[in-house]
Amino acid sequence: MRFSILAGLGLMLWTAPAPAADLPLFDAHLHYSHDAWERFPPERIVAMLRQAGLRRALVSSSNDEGTQMLARLAPDLILPSLRPYRSRGDVSGWTREPAIVEYLEARLARHRYVAMGEFHLYGADADLPVPRRMVELAKRHNLILHAHSDAEAVERLFAQWPEARILWAHSGFARPAAVAEMLRRHKTLWCDLAFRDDHGAGGKVAAEWRPVFAEFPDRFTIGTDTFTPERWPYVIEHAAWSRAWLNDLPKEIAERIGWRNGEALFGTGDR
């Protein structure tokens, strides 16, 4: 009943779209990894982010030096997130590599972060010793978990740390109804919409996403996902595309998804 009432109220609001041409944005999914450094120097990256009109950008990298270069250059813009990857080669095997724990401990002792991730973790692998230790470190340092995971792994992460704040990358590439069900189950789960266009193709919000955004206007963020160097110039185009489909939402919801949710989640509203 709660869902149908909220969805109905939300659908009545779609007749009043927000003017979003100058809408600031919070990009909650960016990477500046080692294969991008020479092609796109830090100064150029920061210039692109500012040209895109971003208020803030959650950045991680493989290895962490990319994130630190950007954070030093633009501390007002860059929010550092620590990946459990020393290079791209760790993506597939990090969950069974004990040296990853030493790497994370060393970086946490040296730098400040707001999140742990984005990490790739699926199913029962979430309960392996290395991911468990990563979660313990995130808990100790009060970090948000940025999880590129299926629903099962997300459930296992919450079982390990019920109070965790999890940002579900790509919303698990799940259907809107499945995303909504996970959000109902977990009050400290947020969803990024990176690298999927099923919610805003053609500058219009898709019908099956509308009731989900109406029910959970405070639980979504946008993201570009620069997982390869070639995607970095797309940041500016993606920002324009995001503003276009956000313009199809009521102003308050557009602002929440566009930037306010990111500010609230990462506690950066007073920065």
Image (cartoon, rainbow, N blue to C red):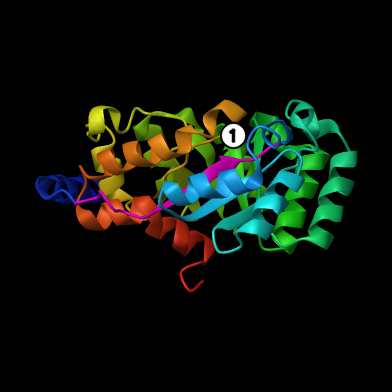
Q: Which residue lies at the image location 42% right of the left edge and 46% below the top edge?
A: 52
| Res 226 → quadrant | top right
Q: Residue 104's x, y, as percent? A: 81, 49
Q: Can residue 130 be seen in this view?
A: yes
Local packing at callout 1 (Cα closer than 10 Å; few below 14, some 14-19, many 20+) is many
Q: Residue 130's x, y, as percent? A: 81, 41
Q: Which residue lies at the image location 49% right of the left edge and 60% below the top edge?
A: 265
Q: Which of 116 and 32 is in front in this view?
A: 32
Q: Is residue 263 above or below residue 5?
A: below
Q: Nearer the viewer, residue 99 or 246?
A: 246
Q: Residue 3's x, y, as percent? A: 26, 46
SS for dot 1? strand
For residue 20: magenta? yes
Q: Is residue 114 above or below residue 192?
A: below
Q: In this view, does 192 lie above or below 110?
A: above
Q: In this view, does 81 lie above or below 226?
A: below
Q: Which residue is farthest bottom?
A: 270
Q: Which residue lies at the image location 36% right of the left edge and 51% below the top edge?
A: 258
Which residue is disc 1 drawn over?
149
Magenta residue span: 19-33
